Image (spheres, rainbow, N blue to C red):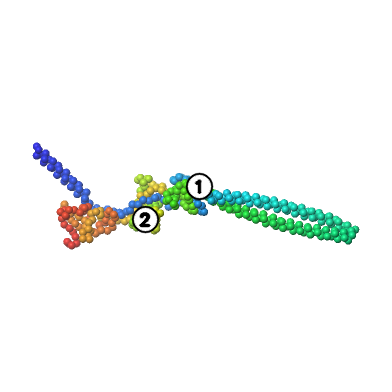
C-alpha cells in the first residue's frame, strides 16, 4: 500500500513538472503571423478650437482683474466676462473732470469781467455822445459869442470828438480781446472734453463683454502659466478670455525633443479622452513649432509643441479636455513582425532561434523598420514558424543556418 502511494505521488509530481515545463515553453515562444507594423508615440495634448475669439486686455492698460467669469461658463453676447481696475486711468478721468470744471469756472468769470468792462465803456461812449450833442447845441450860439467863447466851444467839440474816437477804439479792442480770450478758453475746454471722452472710453473698455454667445475659456497667465484668476495683474493685449468656435477643433501637444524629432507633419493621430471614456477621434499632425520653450523659467530642458487636427470622431470633445494622443510614426500593413527580445546578435549578425522538431535552429535574419518593442523581418522567417523569445540553452540548439555554414 505504501509503495502504491509513493508511485502515485511521483506520477503526479512528474505530470505537474511536465505541464509547468510546457507552459513555460509556450510562454517563451512566439508564432510568426502576418500583422500590421505600427510604431507610435504616446503624448498628452489639450483640445483647443481651430478658430476662436480672444478677448484681450486693452492697450495702454496696466491693471488688476477684479472680476472674471468662471471657466467653462456659457455666456451670451453683451454679458460681462471680465472687469479690470486701473488706478491710473481712473485718476486721470477724475482729474480731467475737475480741470474741466475749473476751466469752465474761469471761462464764466472771464465772460462776466469782460461784459462788465464792455458795459462801462458803452456807458462812457453814450456819455460822450450826450456831451457832443450838448456841445453842438451850444455851437448855435457861436454867432452871439465872443471870439474867446467861440474858440472854447470849438475846442470842447474837438475834445469830445477825440474822446469819442478813443472810446470807440477801446470798445473795438475790448471786443477783439473778449472774443480771443473766450475763444482760447473754449478751445481748451473742447480739447479737455475730447480727452475726457477718450479716457471715458478707455475706462469703459475695462469692462469686457462677450461679443457673441459661446463657451468662455480662461486664458493662461503670462507670469505663472496657469489659468488667470481675480486679483492678478494684466497689461497691454494680454489674452483674458477665449470664446471658441466649437465646429472645428484641434489638439495642441507638448513633448520632449526626442519624440518631437520622430514625428512629421501629416502623421496620423488617434485620440482618447479621460473625461469621455469610450470616445475616439482621429486626425493628423498639421503643424510643428520649430523652436522649443523652457520647461521652467531657468530650465535648460525644453519642450516642443505640435498641433494636430481632429478630422473624425464619435462625439465632439470640449475645449480644455485632455487628449491622450497616439502619433503613428511608421506604419506597414500585413508584414512579419517579431518582438525585439527574440533577436540576438552573433558575430555582427542578427539571428533568431526557430523551433524545429522539438529543438531550435539558429537562423540569420534581416530587419527593416523597428520600434521600441518590435522589428519588421524582411528576410529569414516565414509565417507559421515558431521562434524562441529567449536564447535557448546550447543543448536545445540542434543546428544553425548562417552564411558561413552554407
Sequence-first disc among 2 and 1: 1
Residue shown at the point (55%, 50%) measured from the top left: 91
Q: Is residue 313 left or right of residue 379?
A: right
Disc 2 residue crowd, few under 14, some 14–19, many 20+, Cα 10 Å: few
Q: Is residue 201 left or right of residue 356?
A: right
Residue shown at the point (47%, 48%) measured from the top left: 232
The residue to which callout 2 is attached is 301
Residue shown at the point (84%, 57%) measured from the top left: 136
The residue to which callout 1 is attached is 83
Q: CA distance from mark 2 to mark 1?
A: 37 Å
Q: Is the N terminus in the top left, top right, bottom left or bottom right quadrant?
A: top left
Q: Is the C terminus in the top left, top right, bottom left or bottom right quadrant?
A: bottom left
Q: Position of residue 179 (x, y in %)?
A: 68, 56
Disc 1 residue crowd, few under 14, some 14–19, many 20+, Cα 10 Å: many
Q: Is residue 89 left or right of residue 140?
A: left
Judged from the image, the secondary structure of the residue bearing numbered disc 1 is: strand
List the single residue furthest toward the right.
144
Q: Is residue 128 left or right of residue 245?
A: right
Q: Is residue 174 visible?
A: yes
Foreground residue among 77 and 209 = 209
Foreground residue among 126 and 382 = 126
Q: Position of residue 372 (x, y in %)?
A: 29, 54
Q: Position of residue 340 (x, y in %)?
A: 25, 54
Determine whether 10 is above or below 356 in the image.
above
Judged from the image, the secondary structure of the residue bearing numbered disc 2 is: loop
| CB-based contact (under 8 Å), mark 2 and mark 1 | no
Foreground residue among 52 and 166 = 166
List the single residue furthest toward the front.
148
Residue shown at the point (30%, 54%) measured from the top left: 38
Q: Quadrant of residue 14?
A: top left
Foreground residue among 380 and 390 = 390
Amino acid at each position: 500500500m505504501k509503495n502504491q502511494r509513493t508511485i502515485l505521488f511521483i506520477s503526479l509530481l512528474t505530470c505537474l513538472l511536465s505541464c509547468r515545463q510546457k507552459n513555460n515553453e509556450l510562454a517563451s515562444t512566439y508564432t510568426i503571423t502576418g500583422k500590421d507594423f505600427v510604431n507610435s508615440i504616446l503624448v498628452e495634448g489639450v483640445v483647443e478650437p481651430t478658430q476662436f475669439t480672444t478677448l484681450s486686455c486693452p492697450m495702454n492698460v496696466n491693471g488688476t482683474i477684479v472680476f472674471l467669469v468662471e471657466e467653462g461658463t456659457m455666456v451670451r453676447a453683451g454679458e460681462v466676462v471680465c472687469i479690470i481696475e486701473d488706478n491710473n486711468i481712473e485718476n486721470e478721468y477724475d482729474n480731467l473732470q475737475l480741470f474741466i470744471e475749473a476751466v469752465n469756472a474761469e471761462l464764466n468769470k472771464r465772460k462776466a469781467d469782460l461784459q462788465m468792462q464792455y458795459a462801462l465803456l458803452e456807458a462812457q461812449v453814450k456819455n460822450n455822445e450826450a456831451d457832443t450833442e450838448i456841445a453842438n447845441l451850444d455851437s448855435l450860439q457861436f454867432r452871439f459869442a465872443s471870439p474867446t467863447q467861440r474858440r472854447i466851444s470849438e475846442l470842447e467839440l474837438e475834445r469830445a470828438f477825440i474822446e469819442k474816437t478813443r472810446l470807440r477804439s477801446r470798445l473795438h479792442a475790448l471786443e477783439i480781446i473778449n472774443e480771443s480770450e473766450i475763444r482760447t478758453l473754449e478751445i481748451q475746454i473742447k480739447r479737455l472734453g475730447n480727452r475726457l471722452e477718450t479716457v471715458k472710453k478707455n475706462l469703459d473698455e475695462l469692462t469686457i463683454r462677450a461679443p457673441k454667445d459661446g463657451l468662455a475659456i480662461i486664458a493662461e497667465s503670462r507670469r505663472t502659466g496657469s489659468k488667470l484668476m481675480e486679483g492678478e495683474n494684466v497689461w497691454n493685449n494680454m489674452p483674458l478670455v477665449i470664446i471658441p468656435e466649437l465646429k472645428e477643433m484641434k489638439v495642441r501637444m507638448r513633448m520632449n525633443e526626442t519624440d518631437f524629432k520622430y514625428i512629421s507633419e501629416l502623421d496620423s493621430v488617434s485620440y482618447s479622452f479621460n473625461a469621455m471614456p469610450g470616445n475616439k477621434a482621429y486626425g493628423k499632425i498639421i503643424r510643428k513649432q520649430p523652436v522649443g520653450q523652457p520647461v521652467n523659467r531657468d530650465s535648460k530642458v525644453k519642450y516642443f509643441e505640435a498641433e494636430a487636427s481632429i478630422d473624425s470622431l464619435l462625439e465632439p470633445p470640449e475645449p480644455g479636455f485632455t487628449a491622450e494622443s497616439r502619433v503613428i510614426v511608421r506604419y506597414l500593413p500585413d508584414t512579419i513582425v517579431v518582438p525585439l527580445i527574440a533577436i540576438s546578435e552573433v558575430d555582427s549578425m542578427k539571428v533568431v532561434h526557430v523551433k524545429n522538431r522539438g529543438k531550435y535552429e539558429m537562423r540569420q535574419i534581416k530587419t527593416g523598420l523597428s520600434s521600441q518593442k518590435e522589428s519588421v523581418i524582411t528576410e529569414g522567417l516565414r509565417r507559421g514558424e515558431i521562434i524562441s523569445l529567449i536564447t535557448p540553452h546550447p543543448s536545445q540548439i540542434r543546428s544553425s543556418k548562417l552564411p558561413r555554414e552554407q
